[in-house]
Amino acid sequence: MTDTAEHPPITVTFLGTGTSSGVPMICCDCEVCTSTDTKDTRLRSSILVQSATTTFIIDTTPDFRYQMLRIDNKKLDAVLFTHPHKDHVAGLDDIRAYNYFQKKPMNIFANALTQETLFREFQYAFADKKYPGIPQIHLHTIDDMPFAIGDINITPIKVWHLKMPVLGFRMGDFTYITDANKIDDAEKEKILGSKVLVVNALRNDKHISHFTLTEAVSLAEELQIPTVYFTHISHQLGLHQNVNALLPPNMQLAYDGLTIKIG
């Protein structure tokens, strides 16, 4: 991919790296769910992206409120959504705190498919007659065309979550993809040249709509990405320390609280 746009240095913080049930999973006594290693505790998958002037989050999980409290985040310019599944949108109501303290609506970037779910799940936020204290939203429609949030230029990448189109995003040398099990060749072209790739790797056994760890490793090797992090991880994948020890040197499992700098 040839990218002539200017890209500021960014910092990416992994707010959550778990699958839809989180880790530990309710009622589970497996070795991962009972692990005392903090890297085996995973909230639902989301990242915070920051430049010197712009801060936004990708997806508002059911853990959104706690994720923001955990890192003591006081500034949020926008929310960018990948797709409409519950584990990626359920926390949207808690942007109300940012509305109150920043005294302005939150910029929400989502495609038409995701907007349908937002309108249904958070109908009160879009009603003509708005009750005091509801989320204040400034909605931006995105598709496959590049756009910007503040000074950060973003290229959408369409991936497949079984039959559902999901948006991954490239920001300069950084690409983030979650909830995918197939990427068409034309969309892979958009990833080429990235220095850092984050991609979902649910478990070892085949799954109907997520990459396995082996499939995710193969994708990263095919695209020749220098540094790779895996996210959206299930307790079925295994202990963080054990899995990491088997990965190629340039690849590792992400974990909650991990911060990386690009550029």
Image (cartoon, helix red, strand yellow):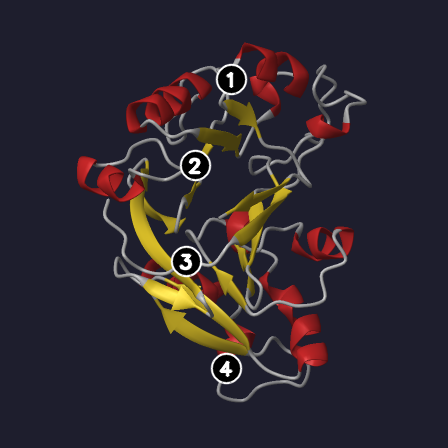
Indicate the amino acid at tag 1: Pro
Residue bearing mark 4: 127
Residue bearing mark 3: 7
**Residue 63: x, y in percent?**
67, 50
Residue bearing mark 1: 249
**Residue 74: x, y in percent?**
72, 66
Q: Are marks 4 and 3 in contact (CB under 8 Å)?
A: no
Indicate the amino acid at tag 2: Leu
Depth check, front residue: 170 or 94? 170
Name which of mark 4 and mark 3 comes first in the sequence: 3
Disc 4 versus disc 3: nearer the observer: 3
- Look at the picture and state if 136 lies above or below 34: below
Q: CA distance from mark 3 to mark 1?
A: 27 Å
Depth check, front residue: 83 or 254? 254
Name which of mark 3 and mark 1 comes first in the sequence: 3
Q: Is residue 191 left or right of residue 62?
A: left
Disc 2 versus disc 3: nearer the observer: 3
Q: Residue at x 25, y 37 (%)?
A: 188
**Residue 248: x, y in percent?**
48, 15
